[in-house]
Amino acid sequence: MPVDTARALAAAPRTTEISWTPEDVQLYHLGIGAGVPATDPRELRYTLESRLHVLPSFATVAGGGAPGVIAALSMPGVDVDLASVLHGAQSLRVHRPLPVRATATRTDRITAVHDKGKAAVLVLRSDAADADGPLWTAEAQVYVRGEGGWGGDRGPSAAVPEERGAPDRTVERPLREDQALLYRLTGDLNPLHADPEFARRAGFDRPVLHGLCTYGTTLKAVVDTLLDGDVTRVRSWTARFAGVTYPGETLRIRMWRGNSAVRVAVGAVERGDAPVLAGATAEFT
């Protein structure tokens, strides 16, 4: 089996030095749709270096590239076709506000491999810290189609209970036709998001948007709509990728606010609110 469970779990953690600059942060923010309208003071917090704040989901690309899928596929014991891989879920816990410029170390390790029957699910944990201490802990679930069925632990259920009652807020966020081409400049060069031939080989009629782009766009909408634009209030952000988003579509983002958390569901407007993110929760102070 191309996923060698025992080897993947026994492998030593991999530590990488990463760094980023204000320009990297600005590019990420533009990649998830910030900067519209360009002169809006609320948007300038994401795009102008003199007042720059870092949306916590920047952690998923900090240092260049998305640690979730790409890092998982490069770990010992994993040798699979990229066309068979999907990003299933992503969680992020920030330990303090992210600096606009930093050098840090990121440690990656596979903590679980689940047998879902028709797929294997790799769980990759990433911890980052700089000289001042821990920055974030992230966990990516990576689905590898066709690699299940060996009789391993199925892991937790991915079922998500449906939200009840009307959402407290609903917003729509249009995506650019070239959104994936812009977002991939943050470092995730998976051809699934740009190459039509590769997308067809993976089972899609055209390139799809990075799940982590939708993930970041949605968190920004939550921060801007319910947290007064204050990125430092976010403590964690978790979501399951329930379906794909295509560049040029419009995201309908529904939010249910509690005392310390916002539950979120996201659908694609042009496809009858087809689910895109489910089971999403942002914890805040």
Image (cartoon, rainbow, N blue to C red):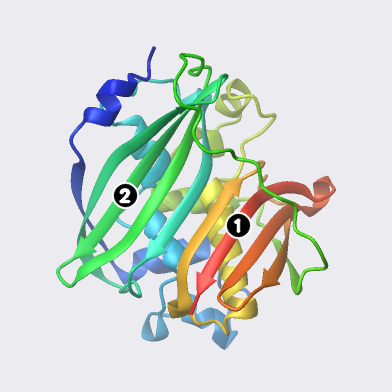
Q: Label 2's element?
A: strand
Q: Disc 1 marks which residue?
A: 280
**Three-letter residue code for mark 2:** Ser
Given residues 16 and 49, the one toward you in this image is: 16
Tag 2 residue? 126
Image position of 77 with respect to 250: above or below: above
Residue 230 locus on image (x, y percent): 50, 82
| Residue ID at (48%, 80%) | 285
Labelled disc at residue 62: none
Residue that appears at 46% across and 65% down: 236
How many numbered marks have been drawn onto this rendered protein structure?
A: 2
The location of residue 173, given as percent across then percent down, is 70, 64
Return the disc, 2 or 1, that comes first in the chain's sequence.
Answer: 2
**Figure quadrant of residue 243:** top right
**Left or right position of 132 against 139:** left
Identified at 23% across, 48% down, the residue is 107
Three-letter code, disc 1:
Ala
Work out which residue is located at the far right of the displayed protein and give it.
272
Residue 275 point in image, percent of width and height: 73, 47
Q: Position of residue 139 (x, y in %)?
A: 40, 48
Q: Residue at x 48, y 81 (%)?
A: 45
Q: Viewed as shown, does residue 251 lie left or right of 218?
A: right
Mark 1, other Cα within 10 Å: few <14 / some 14–19 / many ≥20:
many
